Image (tube, rainbow, N blue to C red):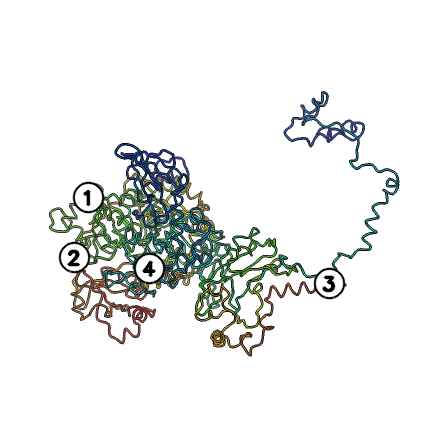
Amino acid sequence: MTITSPQQTATPLVPAAPVERAVAPADTVTFTIDGLETSVPKGTLVIRAAEEIGIQIPRFCDHPLLAPAGACRQCLVEVWTPGRDGNLAKMPKPQASCTLEATPGMEVRTQHTSAEADKAQQGVMELLLVNHPLDCPVCDKGGECPLQNQAMSNGRATSRFVDIKRTFPKPISISTQILLDRERCVLCQRCTRFSEEVAGDVWIDLQKRGAHQQIGTFDADVLGFAGDVPTGAATQDTTGRPFASYFSGNTVQICPVGALTSAAYRFRSRPFDLVSTPGIAEHDSQGSAIRVDHRRGVVLRRLAGDDPTVNHEWVTDKDRFAFAWQSAPDRITTPLVRARNADGTPGELEPTSWVEALDVAAAGLLAAQAPVDPREEAVGVAVLAGGRLTLEDAYAYSKLARVALDTNDVDGRARPHSAEEEAFLGHHVAGRTLEVTFADLDRAPAVLLVGLEAEEEAGIAFLRLRSAVVKKRTRVVSVAALASRGLQRLAGTLLAAAPGTEAEVLDGIVASAEGALGDTAAALREQGALVLVGERLAASPGAYSAALRLTARTGARLAWVPRRVGERAAVEVGLLPSLLPGGRPVADSAARVDIAAVWGVEHLPETPGRSTGEILADAAAGRLGGLVVGGLELADLPDPALARAALDRVPFVVSLEVRRSEVTDRADVVLPVAPPVEKGGTFVTWEGRPRPFPQALVSHELADHRVLDRLADALGVELGLGSLAAVHAELDQLGGWDGARVEAPTVPAPEPPAVEAGHAVLATWHQLLDAGRLQTGEPFLAGTAKRAVARLSAGTAEQLGLADGDRVAVSTDAGTITLPAAVTDMPDLVVWLPTNSVGSAVRDTLHADAGDLVRIAAAPHELAAAGVGDGEDAPGRDEEVGA
Amino acid sequence: MAEKKKPVGKAAPAAKPAPARKPAPAGTPAGRQSKAVAPRPKGGEVATPAPEGYRSLIEPRTGLAELFAPVGGFGVTLSNMFRKTVTEQYPSEKVPAKPRYHGRHQLNRYADGLEKCIGCELCAWACPADAIYVEGGDNTPDQQFSPGERYGRVYQINYLRCIFCGLCIEACPTRALTMTNEYELAGPTRAGMIWEKDDLLAPMREGMLTSPHPMVEGTTDTDYYRGEVTHATDAQRAWVAEHRPDDPTLPGGAGLDVANELAPTAAAMAATVAAATKQGTR
């Protein structure tokens, strides 16, 4: 089966995941519920067995993905069990069916058949409502509230309570995003169990006793809670402290009452207003299922979808809350063409019609391909596509470059990249979909993370890993510069590696090695062991080669886990200068013939093209005639300054964008494209799993592939990608590739650089919530981002005369970033900065990346006060929060 | 059909019974029906009843009554000539509606001027005609429109859709929404029939302060609901004086007449109605 068509093709380009067959349980238990006999696997809870046969038992605390608690007592049922003599005997009191395992011969009578169970449930409901404020009209949960519904179905019609209710100040903000109304809470502990069992961020728990028992934030002093500090302010209760968690939004969704609500959705709408459309989150390569709730063409909230194969029922806060960018005020709604001033210099962008914009774009690109002056150096058109495209859109860029622009100068990597990485992707990743899946993370005995900070860069993989770790099935080892809180929560082992030395460490994982390296080698030899490598390894020479050597040595399987949603799709459809769709090497003539036949062209460009870096370097040097740029942020590129210079220099730039950006500011023609919520398409997860999603909002905006189809038409080439169905049909026709692959890279591990005094090696990675452009318009979410700090070892701090919390200046010739220092257990002479957080735009400010040498010094006070580092007034804000 | 299309002439009388039978139950095959005509079953449902002449069910009158029966109807006319007339001379004279008449809605205020509407959308939920659109909003210390956390930020009633059933009034948990006896709702445009919150809000009365302003110090929304707030306090007036010195409801302000000027939609409709009244008045 393929994405679209049910019929079988030999090897579809991106095959859908096979449906997992249910495993027949070894032991079953037969018992009756309400007189209906049922058989369930041993160990099944009564409440779950009742669900299976369609009997609804009211409940609040029970959640299928959390451990049983028996906290709310709403699910009481009457139970008869066979005694030793074999005769049925009634349990003296009603039992909570959410903690009761089914046993053979048991007879359960729910509220449907037992007056006793019904009365018990009504009594519990009455007690739960004693202190409930009954403020349903102002409560965000009203209309979709289990308490409201079950009070109607399983409660008394009238209240007998006449006393004064217990009240609390309402609401308190646990973070800028999460609001807690303790009056409404029924103490079911779903949120605390989620934070403990699933996220591992223990930020709230029960406090006090009896009638005063309440959910509250943790007392840091008593419990030694060492969480990350958020950037935004939060109300602190009498004992607690604010928290920063990337998964806090899930507690809002699983709260069965309106006790936990989100600031972003506060009082925004009612469930009957909303139209729900299933969707796939666009923020990472995890492909989380979400539900997009919208009213009158405006998205009001997103909820986690239920997909056991990928994200269970959890999503990261970024996937849940960061959607305002899609309707930001700087959205481009019409095609724009840059006017020319009287003297021929470029003027302002002016709105125009599609026909004119496409004509201007086509004329400009044709002129760039074949300049009138044969001595003109700026010749040829290249395509740069960011890492956020759907499969269909990425395919259209790939085909446009090869068919209409006759070039292999096409690259979808808007991040640090290398030739070694390209070879690795062609050799190991392209065309090998679903070789390692989320389910494998659950089963793996050992997982080695290299260049991948799971919590920050792959949120769902982190949760899946954590659930496996909690069940003591999986051991996690990480090759990184420091053991983050994320790794600590995975109970992981750190194989410390200064940036640039990953290859050396990977090569050191041999059975004969002592200590952690040898243990890791042994663990990776176990059946099902995995090595997950991140996209950041591209900046570390030899690391991908070393990872391939390691897996060949140990037999562990290797998977590439990029950060952005479009990275895997880009690899599959050949958005790389040396790769055609399906992992076909450009250099392979058979592969070119294969593709040319499907595309109906006589030949394809034969020489591998230039990478993003080479394209930009050549463009800046005046050796490029035109650029087609889609979904790209210049600040994401390894050298944003070079990229800006390049775009300024290139004679003709066509930009396909959703919002105004640095690229559109420099473009000659801007073609607006639809954001994910206004188009259908398919994201591809890091596993290679296609995740199709429908269009949620009615919109006239076009998806990239439709715009490119029209652009090609204006260029006189028929792409045939005018609709999703057409793209899917062509992808199915293309199919996979069973010919020769790209050769594996064999880059040796380099010598570690010598670090002079006053210098350090820069380590950096993105935090999940940072200053990214897809998070704009969400102040509440931004407040839960971790505060940017510079991490360095105790030794390095001592050398510099710094204490924890002092300001440290990290600089290159390009600029300086000044942040509070956080002394961390990590190698000496390494300094870690968040790549793109508020106050720490590493690439933009320093023009440096992981592995580069930077100067490091204690920040002079006047510098700190002046806010040197980033344009933002971040230092002042830091002090305010840190105080 | 073929029969019908024949030119009218001698065929017409023969064809006449056919259309009469045509509206018979759709599923009935025409062939069987024509067969059934000959041996007509007695009292069957399928068969056409036998054609009978008209027979009045009114008892035939006799004697004098029979003589005057043809002009008996004039008696009704004559007797009404001496009764009080029920015709209302609308719009020359406007008769007040009954107290419980379901007229135009009104969004009420508490005695200190804060709005009663909390933007809960229950009215919109209850509305069978989908005539009400509400969006809630978050009260902040600087912008407190109603007691408690939540207020109605957007409130629209579309009088092209409203059927005046009053289910919204029943649904309202704070008695914010009630109906007035106002029934003159007309206008030349569709947009002009959609009343916004400003149009629907009840006029300010003596002792009220225009919202937003803080709640009476030391009270909760429950106190408001119980009617324990009876007028605006000095502290509230001081707050309004500080934030909106030109507020007409302040002591020494422009007064209630200025405060109660109609909002655009209501004013436009009032103008339309006044013009129509003038035109229709004798």
Q: Where does the C terminus of chain A fall, quadrant-wise?
A: bottom left
Residue appearing at x 19%, y 47% in the figure: A550
Host chain of mark 1: A
Helix, strand or loop at disc 4?
A: helix
First-in-chain label (2 vs 1)? 1
Answer yes or no: are tags 2 and 1 on the same subunit.
yes
The image position of residue B146, as x and y in percent, is: 49, 65
First-in-chain label (4 vs 1)? 4
Answer yes or no: are tags 3 and 2 on the same subunit.
no
Host chain of mark 4: A
Which residue type carries mark 3? Glu
Answer yes or no: are tags 4 and 1 on the same subunit.
yes
Q: Which residue bears the numbered disc 1?
A: A552
Give the CA separation, mark 1 to mark 3. 98 Å
Helix, strand or loop at disc 2?
A: loop
The image position of residue A13, as x and y in percent, is: 35, 41
